[in-house]
Amino acid sequence: MLAGALVACGYGSQRASDGPAAVVPPANAKKLSADQVRIGYFPNLTHATALVGLREGFFQRELGGTRIKPYTFDAGPAEIEALNAGSIDIGWIGPSPAINGYTKSGGTDLRIISGSASGGVKLVVDPKKIKTVDDVKGKKIATPQLGNTQDVALLHWIASKGWKVDPQSGKGDVSVVRTDNRITPDAFRNGSVDGAWVPEPTASKLVAEGGKVLLDESALWPGGKFVITNVIVSQKFLAKHPDVVEAVLRGSVRTNAWIGANSARAEADANAALKELTQKALPADVIDPAWRSLRMLDDPLAATARSEALHAASAGLLASPRLDGIYDLTLLNKVLREEGGPTVDAAGLGAQ
């Protein structure tokens, strides 16, 4: 496997930092089996379940006297490293770093225990340079990082058109330019790239700069759904504290249901959380279309994660992946049954 091939689904460097201050549990609330649970996530709209659930108190209500210690990350590798080092216990993360972390450890370090979000990825282009899909040939298209979820998707799409690109250098019929999402809008504005295959809110930032959505990735997937964010857990923490993991999952399920019923307030919550974490809220012309393109859900859409891994392998970025056992949906399905919802499956990749 290419070292570090499948990395973050989102933003920037591999910096990690404390999130908001640890939430103070209610007075006299009963602790679960752990004094605290350390939760990792990105300051991204694609991690809205964590952003909103923490802000609205859904997780703390389920955890009782067990304290939440939040941490934020800019990219997947740092979060996987923190999970493997025992610095966090549970995290929201994209499928590619989860798959990479699982395969690199030989299946010993993590499990995917829930889905969180689908959608929110678009190919945005300069309409003066690219008017049709065929015009992408010969142009410079940005992705967040070599081998990340969007990079793999673009390489797979290029191959489906019959065009050739070297996956390592990005050179070929299309120039794939790996660019930090935080500077992609500047690169687009000054003409360094002609378009970008990126997640939200970067896609909507490019549209606000005059870009046009040429392709929404959801159009390439059955039913328009594909996993963009999962919930993962340390296998050691899962074995030692299943009650804590179940409480976090119940908080996640209830947060997603609340987001579905209170979209406008949830959007405002997510933006307020982003402002707290990044010192800058998103303007309405960015957050509104970005929010509409995302779908929060509990299903990890395991079949699409398997397809994404196969796409990475066919692009030459990953050896044939062995994903048996990467999912453990036992506690999620217990929560879903108790909440009166349908259960989900692991597409044959569940832990035995």
Image (tube, rainbow, N blue to C red):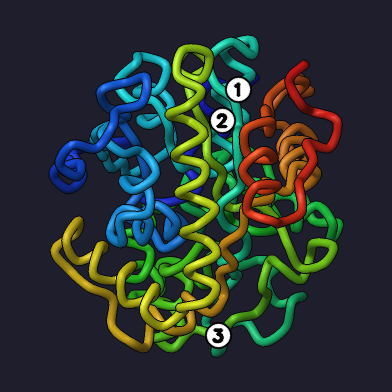
Q: Quadrant of the N terminus?
A: top right
Disc 2 residue type (three-letter): Ala
Q: Which image quarter holds the C terminus?
A: top right
Residues at discs 3 and 2 in contact (Cβ within 8 Å): no
Task: Left or right? Give the position of 98 relative to 1.
Answer: left
Between the C-alphas of marks 2 and 1, the distance is 5 Å
Residue at the disc numbered 3: 212
Query: What secondary structure is found at the residue carrying circle 2?
Result: loop
Residues at marks 3 and 2, CA–CA distance in whole angstroms:
29 Å
Q: Residues within 10 Å of mark 2 (few under 14, many from 20)?
A: many
Please tell me which residue is depicted at 19% across the width and 56% down the height of the picture.
277
**Type of the residue with mark 3:** Lys
Task: Compare marks 3 and 2 and give the one earlier in the sequence.
Answer: 2
Instruction: Say which residue label 2 marks.
Output: 5
Residue 183 in view here? yes
**Left or right relative to 263: residue 55:** left
Q: Which residue is mark 1?
A: 2
Alpha carbon of mark 1 to alpha carbon of mark 3: how far?
33 Å
